[in-house]
Amino acid sequence: MENEQVDVLIIGAGPSGAVSAAYLHNQGFQIKVVEKSKFPRFVIGESLLPRCMEHFEEVGLLDALKQQNFEVKGGARFMRGEKMCNFDFSNKYTDGWDWTWQVPRADFDKTLTDTLEGWGVAIAFEQEVVAVEFDGSESITTIKDAEGGLSTVSAKFIVDSSGHGRVLPRLLNLDMPSKITKNSSIFTHVKDEKRPEGREGTIITFDIVSRETWLWVIPFSNGYTSIGFVGPTDYLESFEGSTTEKLQEMMKLSDYYFDRFEGIGYEFEPRMLKNIAKSVKKLYGDGFVLTGNSAEFLDPVFSSGVTFATESSLTAAKLITRQLNGETVDWEVDYTEHMKAGVAVFSTYVKEWYTGNLQTIFFDSNENPDIKAQICSVLAGYVWDRTNPFVKNHHRLVKTVARVAELEKGH
């Protein structure tokens, strides 16, 4: 069996794998990226956050992405009935990017891999990792190609950026239940034939149809729009029929968007992801690290997926660089604690969204511009800024502000 030797093997060619690959390639390491799919391919996670723009810029991928003219996302809108709450990323507490994109991921991810291949990065598509053996930090990975042929890759380090494929968590028995509520999602794309002119036609919106269930509407610059519901798994499964029939029935729940999308055919049979939140027992081991959705995936309500993917992969790539250059790296402090700090903040916001506390702040309180700017920074992905009270004190501050808003409403 053919055996290839590299410094770093990266599993998965999405944004997480691409950012790691770009950084490590720029550091002069011999890397190989293995991707199970053939690109372009559909994947969910189409709304980015400003924080991740820093990552693409740092590794040299930003210019290629800018050339694609993706839909600019300068904020987000939340609505519940007739009440609306708009966040403008230019009015956030933390310094940093004040815009990002809404992207069809097939095109976005293909741009990343095309750019990497143009740099000379080796990306093997339609190759599936089927086994991994470790001898200390050295690893031998068995890979199956599209014809069923097997080969191996020896590497000094493995980065698992396999996303929902969760390759190493499955092979190494690292999966564990998430503490986030068991929600599922159902989604598709539509040709947005009735799209309004101006901002109304381009803004990403989260339409809350009940405390636990909401609709996303993500317009793209190519004239298509992503629509999808997120809610308790049991509730989504209670709708009868095919996924098309389920989604058509659920669209009736949105007074605001029903007319815009009524009668428009779905570009593909709506897909359903069940119990979407995931977690793992550990984020790294001797000779490997988990990044992106391979490590942890929360609820999509605040679009944190790609930002955690790129934050984790860039952080991991920098630590791998130090380690392969002979430095001692404290993975627990510099990787796990760093990533867990950000995950903890977003987890609080996800949990408090579904308790209703965050919705109370968004819709029922007298708007405080300072509080709104601080929350806006969190929603922009700046969850590592400990100068922000809504980051530093996230566990109690959301509850406290919601309680005050409820008291004010009662008077």
Image (spheres, rainbow, N blue to C red):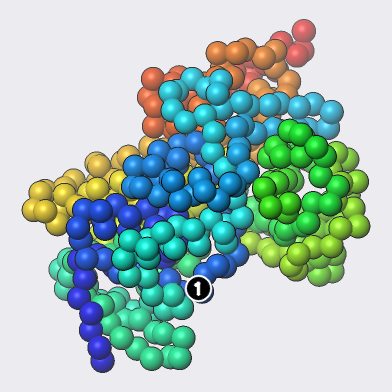
Q: Residue at x 91, y 57 (%)?
A: 263
Image quarter in which the N terminus is found:
bottom left
Q: Is residue 125 visible?
A: yes
Judge left or right: residue 242 versus residue 19: right
Image coordinates of residue 186 in percent, x first then y, are 71, 58
Whether residue 129 is situated above or below residue 333 in the rendered picture: below
**Residue type, numbered disc 1:** Ser
Of residues 94 and 82, the one nearer the viewer is 94
Q: Residue furthest top?
A: 411
**Which x, y percent locates residue 273?**
63, 62
The answer to which of 5 and 247 lies nearer the viewer is: 5
From what the image shows, is residue 288 above or below residue 138?
above
Which residue is drawn at the image coordinates 55% and 51% (left, top)? 68
In the image, is 75 to the left or to the right of 61?
right
Residue 357 picture quarter: top right
Residue 246 x/y as whole percent: 82, 61
The residue at 84%/52% (across/down) is: 193
- Asked if residue 343 can be seen in this view, the reply is no
Q: Residue, x 77% and y 12% (percent of image)?
A: 410
Position of residue 271 relative to residue 325, above or below, is below
Q: Which quadrant of the view contains residue 101?
A: top right
Position of 307 with respect to 352 (left or right) is: left
Decide: few, some or many residues near mark 1? Use Cα within 10 Å; few <14, some 14-19, many ≥20. Answer: some
Q: Which residue is mark 1?
A: 37
Q: Secondary structure at mark 1?
A: loop
User: In terms of depth relative to the viewer, which is nearer, 202 or 67?
Assistant: 67
Q: Is residue 102 left or right of 61 when viewed as pictured?
A: right
The quadrant in which residue 234 appears is bottom right
